[in-house]
Image (tube, grey):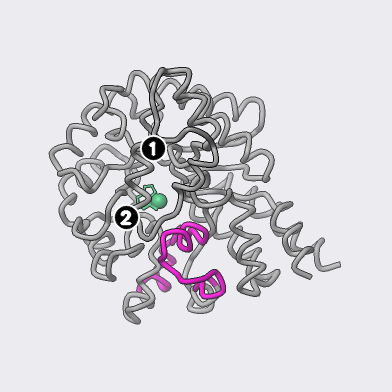
Amino acid sequence: MTASLKRLAARLPKAELHIHIEGSLEPAMMLELADRNGITLPYPDIDAVSKAYNFNCLQDFLDIYYQGMSVLQTEQDFHDLTWAYLQRCHQQNVVHCEIFFDPQGHTERGIGFEVFMPGISRALEKAQDELGISSRLIMCFLRHLDEASAFETLQAAEPYLDAITGVGLDSSELGHPPHLFRNVFERAAQLGLKRVAHAGEEGPPAYVYEALDLLGVDRIDHGNRSLEDDELVKRLASGRMPLTVCPQSNLRLAVIDDMAAHPIRKMLALGLNACINSDDPAYFGGYMNENFDALITSTGLTRDEIFQLVGNGFKSSFLPPAEIAAHMSRINEMREASKE
Ligand code: ADE
Ligand code: ZN
């Protein structure tokens, strides 16, 4: 039974809405790019890298993640990183992706928009042409830096805004509440950008309220801790506010103790608009299908719930309504066919 559900999840066309492109840097590529760019990493080989990927919390991970991205130096590096992720999408039937990137993780090292934007964009265009994968780009502000730095980043992005659909908020959540970024999100809204924010991953329900009320977000990234507040759950459910949930990330960052305790089924039962995503697949043990597999193995996820989660992914995307409808009709056809 679980094997056939895993085959179903693998076969379905899927949308991924929560993936940090820098978090798709596989250990092998990290070592290869370090070599290519003459950078010394504290890891002699892939085993040493994998051993370092043992985290007790979000900050443990972020320290290694920011160090890892130092190997990304040239336009070609950003292209190769993005293209590798898109090939994984193709292998796993992810047909639409909305990709986060962390400009300040690069500009702080002297690598500017003129380097990473063309590299990432070239890979996205090639994926549309050669693999039929559609995509959007979402630029995240690092919340451990201040709002002035976020404003500088938004300004540096202005020549590239045709290629950027929205802004997000990521990095160390605790102690860096959404209200600190209210003005820069307001400016992003004036520029016509969509808005999302990581909230309720480690932070309390109050951070989710702030993201909704002060940042005006279109989606909440993670949102797990919303479950601690019944009023918030009701509000999220009645507004069909998307939650981009990341099961393997939750396990590896100790948001949950084991996969069997993942609240995804509870979220759906409460009427929450959750979908499944990989977050930082190179660091957390897998891409989209591995996240479904883990839930199927450990939580008893059902066929109907798989369809619900996959449909929520498309419906929560920033695609135009006609494209969402086309994806949904394909999924509904597959739902009917899989009953037989
Ligand atoms: N940056 C990359 N992955 C992240 C996560 N899961 N939470 C916050 N910031 C991140
Ligand atoms: Zn994330």
Mark number displayed over residue 121? none
Q: Is residue 243 above or below residue 261?
A: above
Task: Determine if the magenta segment contains residue 89.
Answer: no
Q: Which residue is mark 1?
A: 101
Type of the residue with mark 2: Val
Question: Which residue is more in the foreground, 113 or 333?
Answer: 113
Question: Which residue is more in the foreground, 288 or 334?
Answer: 288
Q: Which residues are magenta?
A: 235-264
The residue shown at (20%, 41%) is: 187
Q: Which residue is mark 2?
A: 217
Question: Which residue is more in the foreground, 37 or 235?
Answer: 37
Question: Which residue is more in the foreground, 207 or 64?
Answer: 64
The residue shown at (55%, 69%) is: 259
Mark 1 surroundings: few (<14), some (14-19) or many (≥20) residues within 10 A:
many
Residue contact at pointers 2 and 1, CB within 8 angstroms:
no
Q: Is residue 179 above or below residue 152?
A: below
- Pick the quarter of the image with the C terminus: bottom right
Q: Is residue 18 above or below residue 307?
A: above
Q: Position of residue 329 (x, y in %)?
A: 68, 54
